[in-house]
């Protein structure tokens, strides 16, 4: 499968990996930042689910 025909979430993951690998950051720093990002988007997902249920 080529990246052009990949699902949007795969394309986004590849882009994020590329951005993070181009910056000389310690892996521990990247993982801590990703945990914060995941928590933020998990909250947004929960809010969206609540709004759809209303």
Image (cartoon, helix red, strand yellow):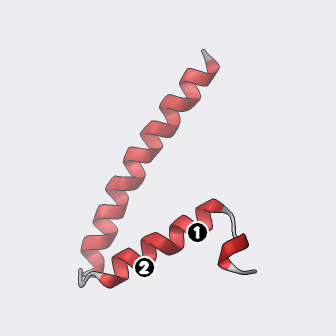
Give left or right: position of 29 versus 43. left
Q: How many marks?
A: 2
Quadrant of the image occupied by residue 23: bottom left
Which of 38/3 is in front? 3
Q: In this view, does 11 lie above or below 53?
A: below
Q: Which residue is drawn at 51% across and 39% down?
A: 45
Please provide percent x and percent y for residue 48: 53, 31
Q: Which residue is drawn at 30% across and 72% down?
A: 30
Q: Which residue is drawn at 33% across and 69% down?
A: 31
Residue linked to disc 1: 11
Please provide percent x and percent y for residue 4: 67, 74
For the residue labelled by badge 1, is the local secondary structure a helix, a strand or a loop? helix
Give left or right: position of 46 versus 36. right
Q: Residue at x 61, y 68 (%)?
A: 10
In this view, the residue farthest toward the front is 4
Q: Is residue 7 above or below residue 50?
A: below
Which of 6/45 is in front? 6
Q: Distance between the residues labelled 1 and 2?
A: 11 Å
Label 2, residues with CA under 10 Å away: few <14, some 14-19, many ≥20: few
Q: Is residue 42 above or below residue 5?
A: above
Quadrant of the image occupied by residue 19: bottom left
For the residue labelled by badge 2, is the local secondary structure a helix, a strand or a loop? helix
Where, quadrant-wise, is the N terminus in this rendering?
bottom right
Residue linked to disc 2: 18
In this view, the residue farthest toward the top is 54
């Amino acid at each position: 499968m080529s990246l052009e025909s990949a699902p949007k979430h795969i394309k986004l993951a590849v882009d994020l990996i590329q951005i993070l690998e181009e910056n000389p950051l310690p892996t521990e720093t990247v993982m801590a930042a990703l945990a914060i990002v995941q928590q933020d988007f998990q909250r947004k997902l929960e809010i969206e689910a609540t709004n759809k249920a209303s």
